[in-house]
Image: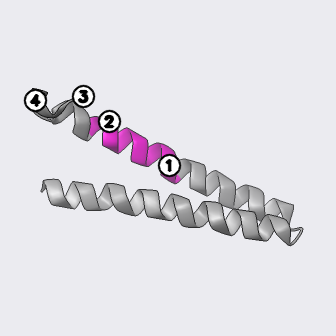
Amino acid sequence: MAGNTDSHIADLHTKAAYAHAAAAHVHSTGDYASAQELARKALGYSMEAVKRTEEVAKSAPQTMQV
């Protein structure tokens, strides 16, 4: 199950990265409203990934925590 969680978290980070790249591209074309929406999505993906990562870190064995 941990591999599934890790994969889901990695997917969230990837989606955030793509949304950030898409937002930057759309912004450069002058479509600021679409860029803002994509940036919001990217932020949402990033925040969800951080939340999930922190949950996994809390449940990690003490020897693995930094």
* Label 3 CA crowd tier, 10 Å (few <14, some 14–19, many 20+): few
Residue for badge 3: 66
Q: Distance between the residues labelled 1 and 2?
A: 12 Å
Q: In which quarter of the image is residue 4?
A: bottom left
* Label 1 CA crowd tier, 10 Å (few <14, some 14–19, many 20+): many
Q: Distance between the residues labelled 3 and 2?
A: 12 Å
Left or right, 45 with respect to 53, comes to: right
Q: Distance between the residues labelled 1 and 4?
A: 27 Å
Residue for badge 4: 63
The dominant secondary structure in magenta is helix
The part of the chain drawn in magenta is 45-55
Disc 1 element: helix
Q: Is residue 66 magenta?
A: no
Residue for badge 2: 54
Horizontal and vertical percent for residue 35?
76, 62
Q: Which of marks 2 and 4 is in front?
A: 4
